[in-house]
Amino acid sequence: MLKSQFKANDIPRSTTQPRFKKLLEKDSKRRQENIEASVAKTQASQKPFSFYGRDMKKRMEALNLIDDIDTTMLCQFRARIVPWRILVPRFKMMMEKEEHEREQRIRQNAEKSFAQAKLPPRMQEHADEARRRIEEDLDSTH
């Protein structure tokens, strides 16, 4: 059917070469050099000031002191018994009480507004008229 045979092209050599890996290595090397240069620049600019080194020494000494703490020093601490007032779930009870009061207030307001609700005048007249007709029909059937 086909007059010419399909022939695939060879895969380019650049496809099998680890170019991206080389790029990442190059970037990490450049980043590391920038960090080293920045540290060197910072140290060169702080030479006249001795407080940075002094502060670093204090931090290192504090870290060393933390390691020197004996287990006897840790065992000296004893917590007191928790008072019963703290263990009582007051907050939960208070929130439940407020929620109950809120529900009662909402129910009372709903009942009050329902009692005060009225139809517009024309609709009220129509409802009264319909009620009167029904009463007349009931009276006439008896």
Image (spheres, rainbow, N blue to C red):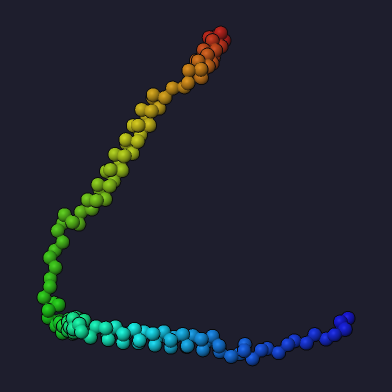
Q: Is residue 105 visible from the viewing direction of this image? A: yes
- Total numbered labels placed on residues in the image: 0
Q: Residue at x 27, y 86 (%)?
A: 44
Quarter of the figure with residue 141: top right
Residue at the spot 33% in from the left edge and 39% down from the top edge: 103
Relative to 132, residue 67 above or below: below
Q: Quadrant of residue 34?
A: bottom left
- In percent of width and height, residue 110 lies at 38, 31
Viewport quadrant of the C terminus: top right
- In the image, taking residue 9 as reference, residue 103 lies left or right, namely left
Q: Which one is in front, 122 or 52? A: 52
Determine whether, in the image, residue 134 is placed left or right of residue 95: right
Whether residue 141 is situated above or below residue 111 in the rendered picture: above
**Residue under the image location 56 percent in, 8 percent down:** 140
Q: Position of residue 4 (x, y in %)?
A: 85, 85
Residue 66 in view: no
Q: What residue appears at the point 29 percent right and 83 percent down from the top-left corner?
A: 42
Asked if residue 105 is positioned above or below residue 93 in the image, the reply reads above
Q: Position of residue 16 (x, y in %)?
A: 61, 90
Q: Is residue 15 shown left or right of residue 51?
A: right
Towards the viewer: 44 or 22: 44
- Name which quarter of the figure residue 108 lies in: top left
Left or right, residue 95 beside residue 113:
left
Specify the quadrant that holds the N terminus.
bottom right
Image location (x, y in percent) of residue 20:
54, 85
Along the line of sight, the residue nearer the viewer: 69 or 74: 69
